[in-house]
Image (spheres, rainbow, N blue to C red):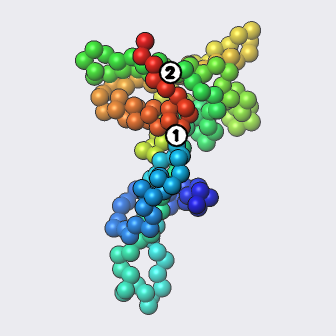
Amino acid sequence: MASLQSLAFASPISHCSHQPRRVSVFSIGSIHSSASSSFNGQSLTIPHSRSPKHSQTHKNHRLSVIVMVKPAIQFIKGTDEQTTPDVRLTKSKDGSNGMAIFTFTEPSVFDSSSIVGDITGFYMIDEEGMIQSVDVNAKFVNGKPAGIEAKYTMRTPREWDRFMRFMERYANASGLSFVKK
């Protein structure tokens, strides 16, 4: 089933944004309860290809596919960062804004950037979409790249909530835990 779900995510239909009526094929609960996985599902709708004789009997039927997206951090779109970051959070007293500071020591992006391309930003990707920032700084020691610090600023409570949902998914997938200092 995992190969079907991965294939469905790579399909061009995964980028459809409209939500027509659909007939559910998979039960989300049965997928999640059958495997202890850090993957989360995203529902997609795939229209049936119809021959003229079937178009009258199957007017509004759609095929629903669950797509699994593992939360990931990327510096180059399409290339997941393998290094687990140290994450520090700050939040204003009124809760209206905050900042997340990610510190990566010897990130894997330095190994692949010469092959794949330049660092273009800081991308946090999960089932809800992408959160991005351009506040990325590389640290060099003796002329060699040693680390990356990326900052994501949250200016509204809505951005804070969205970031926290991403971090919960990313932490579960990466085995991270929250420590209040």
Q: Return the residue at label 2.
A: 87
Residue 7 visible? The answer is no
Report the residue at 33% width, 25% height from top: 155
Under mark 2, the amino acid is Val
Horizontally, residue 138 falls left or right of residue 127, namely right
Please tell me whether mark 2 sits on a helix, a strand or a loop. Answer: strand
Report the residue at 63% width, 14% height from top: 139
Residue 73, percent from left and from top? 55, 34
For residue 71, the mark is 1
**What residue occupies the far left of the structure in this picture?**
94
For residue 91, the mark is none
Report the residue at 63% width, 28% height from top: 83
Horizontally, residue 15 falls left or right of residue 114, namely left
Answer few, some or many: residues within 10 Å of disc 2's Cα (few below 14, many 20 plus, some between 14 and 19): some
> Which mark sits nearer the N-terminus, 1 or 2?
1
Under mark 1, the amino acid is Pro
Q: CA distance from mark 1 to mark 2?
A: 15 Å
- Which image quarter is the N terminus in? bottom right
Answer few, some or many: residues within 10 Å of disc 1's Cα (few below 14, many 20 plus, some between 14 and 19): many
* Nearest to the observer: residue 35 or residue 181: 35
Residue 158, percent from left and from top? 31, 33
Image quadrant in which you'd find residue 6: bottom right
Please tell me whether mark 1 sits on a helix, a strand or a loop. Answer: loop
Residue 140, percent from left and from top? 68, 13
Image quadrant in which you'd find residue 90: top left
Residue 54 visible? The answer is yes
